[in-house]
Amino acid sequence: PSYTGYLTFQGDDRYIKVVDRSGVTFPSLSRKSDAATVLNPTTNPIFVECDVAIPDTASGKQYLFHHMSSAGVGYAAYFESSVLAAENVDVNFVITSGSLKLSNTAKIPKGKFNHLCFYYDTSVGKRRSYIVSGSEVVSTSDRVTFQNIDTEGAPLLIGSGSELGSFVPTQTLSGSINNFRVFHEVRTPSQIDRYTKRTLFADQNPRVNFRFNEATGSYTNSNTVLDHSGQ
């Protein structure tokens, strides 16, 4: 038998830090241990997807994920503050490099899981960022060409992040997430739909693949999240 579930954050300063150096954390268990970056997009597309549920309570400004270099180059998704009576919460997706910036905003319902995708398409004729909810594109940005989005091996943070432009978080994430995945390719609608409810394996070439199906209870390294990407 296997245990399947999701991870719930309580807004209590706990978050996930993904070290972007292959094999550094557990070299004896890693397929690669060359300390190379895995998540730095450089000239590749950015594609992040996950299931996320924000509780139907009041909440402050908070990050879903944040992957930025010390120079402020990278991408992030965050939630605006929300009052108790609000049925929806605003989610924003931002990409920034030097003087260039793209941003998207969409509304998602609180109190339920939403399958969200955030991506930047580098192909000619696109070069836009998108937010997808379920199978529907709910936000499309203007066109901006980034020559290189270099996160310089900075860690990917899930549930936390630092000040970004005018956005200043007031808390760490309060909500539940499942099936957090990062790709360096744009996933097709059929791929998104197929793997929304299915287990995704390394043959789909994810850069990160967190299933959050670790066993409950107390055991060694219980504060570690298992990555199933094969990277």
Image (cartoon, rainbow, N blue to C red):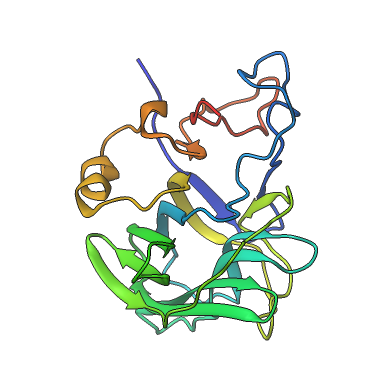
Spot occupied by residue 209 in the image (x, y as percentages of width and height): 48, 37
Could you say which quadrant of the image residue 202 lies in? top left
Compared across the picture, whether 166 is left or right of 119 comes to right
From the viewer's perspective, tell me whether residue 198 is left or right of residue 108: left
Q: Nearer the viewer, residue 185 or 78?
A: 185
Question: Can you say whether 48 is above or below 6 in the image?
Answer: below
Q: Is residue 191 left or right of residue 66?
A: left
Image quadrant where one finds the N terminus: top left
> As displayed, is residue 123 above or below residue 24?
below
Q: Count all numbered tags in the image, as a single digit.
A: 0
Q: Residue lying farthest right? A: 70
Q: Quadrant of residue 27?
A: top right
Q: Position of residue 82 (x, y in %)?
A: 50, 81
Q: Residue visible at 54% across and 31% down?
A: 227
Q: Nearer the viewer, residue 192 or 210?
A: 192
Specify the quadrant that holds the C terminus.
top right
Q: Residue at x 58, y 26 (%)?
A: 217
* Residue 203, image x, y percentages: 37, 27
